[in-house]
Image (cartoon, rainbow, N blue to C red):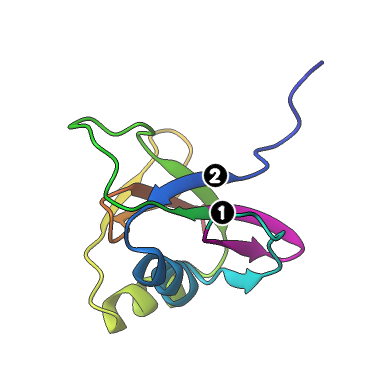
Amino acid sequence: MPLKWLDHVNIRTAHLQAMTEFYQRVVGLELGHRPPFPFNGTWLYLGDQAVLHLVEAESPPMGTEPRIEHFAFCATGLDEFIARLQALSVSYRRATVPATGLEQVHFSDPDGNHIEVGFAPK
């Protein structure tokens, strides 16, 4: 059974509201339907797909090393995305993948999770 795509990422957070707002304002995901689980959380969508599930935790998850090094989205509109990050005062780092020209933008969410957004070469 070959894998076809990444369905979603699930992040436990003690900062549900801040994380939800961050992924809406900075990344551009949209808040959408979430089944009535017996615990708090939000589902954030990219089009019709719930790509990010946030689950509220009473306290921040423990550990000095990240459980996930990063997760990545593909996007278009590099200049507009950089402008959004700057307007929202979000620190970021740009990188170009050698031999491909793929542009990457790296930044962190309020819980310190590493996010990458990739843009095809111009």
Residue under label 2, please give it. Answer: 9
Residue 47, horizontal then vertical, whole percent? 72, 66
Secondary structure, magenta segment, majority class: strand
- Examine the rendering and report whether any part of residue 44 can be seen: yes
Q: Which mark, by number, is residue 116?
A: none
Residue 17, horizontal then vertical, whole percent? 40, 71
Instruction: From the viewer's perspective, tell me whether residue 96 is left or right of residue 63.
Output: right
Distance from Cα at disc 1 to Cα at disc 2:
5 Å
Instruction: Name the residue located 38 percent from the left edge and 78 percent from the top edge.
Output: 84
In the image, is residue 31 part of the stretch drawn in magenta? no
Read off the magenta span. 40-53
The amino acid sitting under disc 2 is Val
Residue under label 1, please give it. Answer: 52
- Examine the rendering and report whether any part of residue 120 can be seen: no
As drawn, the residue found furthest toward the left would be 64
Instruction: Name the residue located 48 percent from the left edge and 38 percent from the top edge.
Output: 100
Question: Looking at the picture, does residue 68 appear above or below residue 28?
Answer: above
